[in-house]
Image (cartoon, helix red, strand yellow):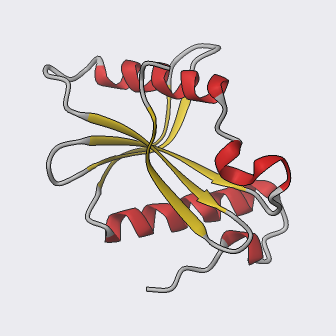
Amino acid sequence: MVFLNPITQSQSSTKQKGDAAENAALLFLQQQGLRLLHRNYRTPGRGGGEIDLILQESDGTVVFVEVRLRARRQFGGALASVGLTKQRRLVFAARYFLLRWRQHPPTRFDVLAWEPEDMIWLKGAFEAGH
C-alpha cells in the first residue's frame, strides 16, 4: 500500500499535519500486524508524558510509538528530534501505563519518523534504562 506523506499534504496547520502523520502511522503499523491498545495516552498531572501510539505485537510485546514529523532535515530531522528528555518522558509514561498490568509484558520503544522524502520506522529506538 502507498502512504501519502503527511508533509506533502495540504493541511493548513501543524496540528493537522501531526494528526495526519499519526493516522498514517497507525494505519501502517496495523497493516504490519500490530493491534492498537491506546492512542495519545497521557499521564495525569503536570510534568508527565504522552505517548502517541501504544500497540501490541502478536507475540505480546507492547510497543510504545513516538510519531515525529519534520518538513526539513535541519538539525537531524525527525529521528534526531527524539532526544534524551523526550525519551525519559516516554519511559515515565510507559511505566505509568503498565502499572495496571498484573504481569509486565515485553516492551519496546519505537519511533516512526516522517521525513521529507520517506517514512522511517525505527524499532527499538531506545531502551527504558535511559
- Decide if residue 80 is on the left or right side of residue 25: right
Residue situated in front as seen by the camera: 35 or 44: 35
- Decide if residue 73 is on the left or right side of residue 96: right
Q: Residue at x 38, y 20 (%)?
A: 95
Q: Quadrant of the N terminus?
A: bottom left
Residue situated in front as seen by the camera: 121 or 97: 121
Height in image: 103 above or below 59?
above
- Decide if residue 97 is on the left or right side of residue 66: left
Residue 61 x, y percent position in the rendering = 23, 42
Residue 67 x, y percent position in the rendering = 57, 51
Residue 20 x, y percent position in the rendering = 63, 65
Q: Residue at x 70, y 74 (%)?
A: 117
Height in image: 54 above or below 68?
above
- Decide if residue 2 is on the left or right side of residue 75: left
Q: Quadrant of residue 10?
A: bottom right
Q: Quadrant of residue 70?
A: bottom right
Height in image: 93 above or below 29?
above
Q: Residue at x 78, y 71 (%)?
A: 11
Q: How many marks?
A: 0
The furthest residue to the bottom: 1
- Residue 98 visible in this rendered orientation of the protein: yes
Residue 106 x, y percent position in the rendering = 22, 33
- Residue 49 visible in this rendered orientation of the protein: no
